[in-house]
Image (spheres, grey):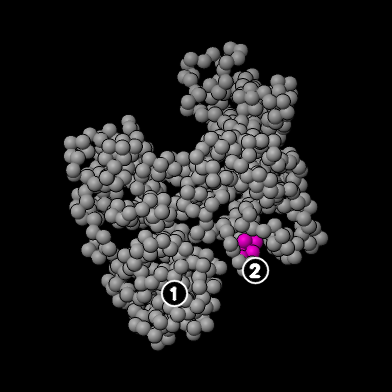
Amino acid sequence: MSDRSIAFNQPSALIVEDNPFNRELLKRVLNAQNLQVMEAKNGKEALSMIRVHPFTMIFMDLLMPGMDGYETIERIRRMGVQTPIIIVSSMSSKEDRRRCLDVGGDEFLPKPIDARLLRDIAERYAAGRPADKPGDGPPLPANGEKEYPVEKQSLSLSSFSALLVEEDRERALRYKRFLEARFMEVAHVANGDQAIAIFEKNRHRFRIIVSNIFTTGIDGLGVLARFKREYPDVFFFIYADEYDADAFQLAVQLGADGVLTADRFEEAIEGMIESAIFQAGQRGSRLQSASTATQVRQAQAHLIRQGCSSNCGLMNIAYSPLSDAGGDIACCRRFNLAGRCGVFLGDVAGHNVLSSYVSAFYMGILTANWGANQRPRELLKMINSELNRSDYDQYHLCASALLWDQRRGTLRIASAGNPGPLVVRPQNGENRIIRDMEGGGMCLGLLDDEDLFLSDLFSFDPGDYLFIFSDGMERSRLIELLTSDSDILRGTLGEIGQRIVDRTIERWGQEDDMILITLKAPYPDLLVENGRHFSFSDGYKGVDRACGWVRQTLEEKGRPVDRDLYLVMIAVREALINAVCHGNRMVPGAYVDLALLFEADRFCIRVSDGGPGVDLPRDLVRIEEIDVLQTGGRGISAMRSIADETTVEGGTLTICFNDR
């Protein structure tokens, strides 16, 4: 965003566009027309600038993260600003154009941008009415934010009554007050059973239902399915505390008129309701509506994410979307605390709304199965089988799956249709490509012979970088950037990834969504904690050796203090047997990693395996039902009864003992 001031007596333009390439194209043409130009990357930035700068015209993209173009235009008009707004978008159907004008746009400029038409529009508005000066519209309150009176909304909601389904009383009260400012009446019930009961007694009272997806009894999805089957004219909106690709995908399939996360409720629910009511009066498919496309694009951002509970500093995902693309998946997952991680990158063919739905569908499959199935090749086979059984035969998936064992410095990767990864080693002031892996092949959903998937196992040496990327980034260009600039790998992984994406766009532009995943192999000292480590891969023999190592190490340290070492070793052996039998499922060669961690007043034994972990609340039994001296069958319950603390994170089980 430029910090240049805009003179009142000179023609000026504001560009609101999240794509830097499109912003630059618009800026060059408008500058050639002697227009002063300022830029905003999203709707929030645009509103802040409009409050303090006069503009002769505004060029507005529609599909932007956060506040989309429709909502931004509505807010601008509700501020009392009458500056001409030219919508610049690839969504150019008759319905899209009509809605743009209905929310307050003045003209439509389709993408790809015709420079001649852009010049004509700029010249016409530059010679037309003057820009609005700051201060027009409602005054600012003390907190500096604009207030948007209900009576100035483009669509009055006062004739609609709503039913709110929420168990949390504090949240329900806040949401009810928020909705009552926009509706004639809002009733509140705690769960789905009550919602159905009150609706059946007052069938003509409520036109809108807003429900938490998780409630006791019949949950939000169950209520949604029933209402859409029996009362299809009722508008139904679903929200949840966190984005859940599986649940939101199912909600849309069941006919939800909008899905959102709780942290965006007060920001987005009003616009969603207005859009749904507007669409109800229009003809056309739900998938073709601009509002639904906007919601899916916002949901798409959640499919590109760091999946670890904490940032390990060894992995980063850089992403630059195009507003008219979509259907991408990229995420990482930490399987245990011994440095066993997974990475998945997928690109669904097709640049429309359904491709984003399909990508959400496969993120759901991945989320449900990845922890239990950490073998990349087998994971691709599973997704391929699902794709071949589904009705999405035109939406094949290019994918890469990777399993990274940091402690042993190995990477196992499988790919189907995606470009092959690159391994780069900085050395003697230059970056050398030391491994250029094969890519391409057949995408998932296009083949039945699953042996055609490409797979590889190789060493990933300390200090090396690995880059996995979608086909939106050309291999030759990435290699040119990595080898021609020795400083490009300077800084954090986040800085490196974003720098490469930005420089690619600056030099060659952007034709598709761009995803770049960067990994860096750690040096051994980064994997060493305040403790001692031991690994084995030979089943019960390894358990015996590991128990001997733990006992010897504890005796050397003089631990435990004032408690029975025999009982401690019972808990340790149960943890190790659990790792071999349940975590690794007796797979030959599967590793178990131990870490003995010592603190001033306690010590912990951390056992990591290749499994998905356990659910402690479900698997525990009451302590009084256990005989800790019995042989076998004691499991986690014995560990918990003996240890002072038992925790599970993924495939890592930790038992801690306090000194007494």
Question: Picture coordinates of residue 320 (x, y %)?
Answer: 56, 59
Question: Amino acid under label 2?
Answer: Arg
- Specify whether 208 is left or right of 635: left
| Direction top: furthest residue | 630
Q: Is residue 591 above or below residue 81?
A: above
For mark 2, give the secondary structure: helix
Which residues fall within the magenta stretch? 500-505
Question: Picture coordinates of residue 423 (x, y %)?
Answer: 74, 51
Towards the viewer: 173 or 374: 374
Q: How many marks?
A: 2
Q: Is residue 340 above or below residue 258?
A: above
For mark 1, give the secondary structure: strand
Q: CA distance from mark 2 to mark 1?
A: 24 Å
- Specify whether 592 is left or right of 75: right
Task: Please tell me in which quadrant of the rendered image residue 406 appears.
Answer: top right
Position of the C terminus, as image quadrant, is top right
Q: Residue at x 76, y 59 (%)?
A: 431
Q: Is residue 616 above or below residue 426?
A: above
Question: Amino acid under label 1?
Answer: Leu
Towards the viewer: 650 or 291: 291
Q: Which label number is shown at residue 264?
A: none
Q: Which label number is shown at residue 14?
A: 1
Q: Which residue is mark 2?
A: 507
Question: Picture coordinates of residue 461 (x, y %)?
Answer: 76, 47
The answer to whether residue 213 is visible is: yes
Q: Residue at x 20, y 55 (%)?
A: 158
